[in-house]
Image (cartoon, coloured by chain):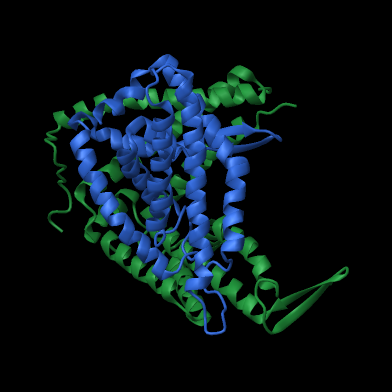
């Protein structure tokens, strides 16, 4: 059986990763309500909202926050359909799926709402079950929406720098920023690696061979990364790095 | 295994942030001491590396594909403390910029994947490979076993964290407010998949990468051991 779907899948995944990033950049560049706010304010506001969602014990409050976030997305000129798709797929849908058994009496005993007879067995949907599943999914989707909205309306490097307001040590912020840059480089390496595999093996790779190829590609990526390290360090030295990271921007703000 | 927001209650989230703070501080201190100045960019590169390992799809029996998490591999290559920092950075980038894993759950996610996973895996690897030469096949086996135990330990932790939610957070009538399943459901659900499928993907990738590096650049397997 031809088994090259791991090749296709990897290529598609890296491509969708780049596509998402381009979309995110495009949204962050629009002139909308949240795009005009500064990254630090947005980070703090998002954290406050997330904490609110975390502590909320009222389904109306959770729904109100969710609608508020959707409103902010519209005000920030984000296509609502795109936003809903982006936030519901995959985590909330998955959560909805795993919350399904909790609807019924064997996990959530209580006042029955609906009885589904399936053959000899009667599945009893209960009120506490509905509430538990509702809380769970509402909390998950609202939290994901807040995070995605922040990431969509803020340039990523500004968002990472904004972490300094939370007293994240400068060293961590520097590593975060550098890591972010290398992700794109490495994702491109992954894409090229799989394209190269595809062009060499065509439509058929045995599973065993496939696993070897992938593991070797990972190992060779690490070899390249290690070599890259020396170059990056020399580049840092040449720009004046002396053991402590220094940043030029934002001093005037 | 990335726990999203909404699965864990405030007490659990706060608890794991509190647990991770001293671990992060200690990790920074130890890494500053052991890592040469020249290797500072390596932490960032290591984070990016652990981020993209998940993009490498591996064929698994049954015609499907899976991907490795790579935490134990990163620990073998960088040492466990540097791995803690590198994986934490990768998890923060994933949560903040790509919505993968919750922000309130960063403490818990880091505890499972940036602390338990690399430490268990790394020390199992060191224990089994103790006294072996860098090219010995015992190291390959050690890497595989370390990877398997590391990821399953992390999955067990996640399962316990989920399973405790209905006990900690519920309304007066016992209705769950966060993850709705108790330990008897959450632990087997988390552990089952990892013991049977994901753990083996981790074994294959970690062992094969170590085997490749033994042949191609054995010095990369020794670089962090020498530093300790």
In this view, the residue farthest toward the right is: A119
Who is closer to the viewer here, A149 or B189? Answer: B189
Q: Is residue A23 above or below residue B146?
A: below
The residue at the point 68 percent across, 28 percent down is: A3
The quarter of the image holding the C terminus of chain B is top left
- Position in image of residue A83 (x %, y %): 51, 60
Q: Is residue A20 visible?
A: yes
Q: Is residue A27 left or right of residue B177?
A: left
- Name which quarter of the figure residue A186 lies in: top left
Q: Is residue A227 visible?
A: no
Along the line of sight, the residue nearer the viewer: A64 or A77: A64
Q: Is residue A230 left or right of residue A19?
A: left
Q: Tell me which chain appears blue.
A: B
Q: Identify the residue at image location x=72%, y=76%.
A: A125
Measuring from the top left, give residue B221's x and y in whole percent: 36, 24
List x then y, in percent, for residue A210: 61, 25
On screen, residue A243 versus residue A142, left or right, reads left
In the rendering, what colour is chain A?
Answer: green
Q: How far from the left and from the top, in percent, is residue A217?
A: 49, 24
Q: Residue at x 41, y 65 (%)?
A: B12
For the image, the number of numbered tags is 0
B190 versus B178 height, above or below: above
Nearer the observer, A169 or B9: B9
């Amino acid at each position: 059986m031809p088994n090259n779907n791991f090749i296709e899948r990897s290529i598609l995944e890296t491509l969708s990763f780049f596509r998402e990033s381009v979309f995110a950049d495009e949204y962050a560049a629009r002139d909308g309500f949240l795009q005009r706010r500064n990254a630090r304010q947005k980070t703090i506001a998002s954290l406050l909202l997330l904490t609110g969602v975390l502590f909320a014990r009222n389904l109306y409050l959770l729904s109100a926050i969710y609608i508020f976030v959707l409103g902010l997305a519209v005000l920030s000129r984000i296509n609502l359909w795109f936003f809903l798709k982006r936030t519901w797929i995959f985590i909330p849908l998955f959560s909805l799926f795993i919350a399904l058994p909790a609807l019924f009496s064997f996990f959530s005993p209580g006042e029955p709402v609906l009885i589904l007879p399936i053959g000899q067995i009667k599945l009893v949907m209960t009120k506490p079950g509905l509430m538990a599943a509702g809380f769970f999914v509402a909390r998950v989707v609202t939290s994901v929406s807040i995070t995605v909205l922040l990431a969509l309306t803020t340039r990523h490097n500004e968002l990472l720098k904004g972490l300094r307001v939370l007293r994240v040590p400068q060293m961590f912020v520097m590593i975060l920023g550098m890591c972010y840059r290398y992700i794109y480089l490495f994702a491109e390496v992954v894409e090229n690696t799989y394209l190269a595999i595809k062009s060499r093996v065509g439509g058929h790779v045995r599973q065993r061979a496939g696993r070897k190829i992938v593991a070797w590609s990972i190992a060779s990526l690490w070899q390249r990364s290690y070599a890259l390290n020396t170059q990056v360090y020399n580049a840092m030295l040449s720009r004046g790095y002396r053991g402590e990271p220094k940043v030029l921007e934002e001093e005037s703000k | 295994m990335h726990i999203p927001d909404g699965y864990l209650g405030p007490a659990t989230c706060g608890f794991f942030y509190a647990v991770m703070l001293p671990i992060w501080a200690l990790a920074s201190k130890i890494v500053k001491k052991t890592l040469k100045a020249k290797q500072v960019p390596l932490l960032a590169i290591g984070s990016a590396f652990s981020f993209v390992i998940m993009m490498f799809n591996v064929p698994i029996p049954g015609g499907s594909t899976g991907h490795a998490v790579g935490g134990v591999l990163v620990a073998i290559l960088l040492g466990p403390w540097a791995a803690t920092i590198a994986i934490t950075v990768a998890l923060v980038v994933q949560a903040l910029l790509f919505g993968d894993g919750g922000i309130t759950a960063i403490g818990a996610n880091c505890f499972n994947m940036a602390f338990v996973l690399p430490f268990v895996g790394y020390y199992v690897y060191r224990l089994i490979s103790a006294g072996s030469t860098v090219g010995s096949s015992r190291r390959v086996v050690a890497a595989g076993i370390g990877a398997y135990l590391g990821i399953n330990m992390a999955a067990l932790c996640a399962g316990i964290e989920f399973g405790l939610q209905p006990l900690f957070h519920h309304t007066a009538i016992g209705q769950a407010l966060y993850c709705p399943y108790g330990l008897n459901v959450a632990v087997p659900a988390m552990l089952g998949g990892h013991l049977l499928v994901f753990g083996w993907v981790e074994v294959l990738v970690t062992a094969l990468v170590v085997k490749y590096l033994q042949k191609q650049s054995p010095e990369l397997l020794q670089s962090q051991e020498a530093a300790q």
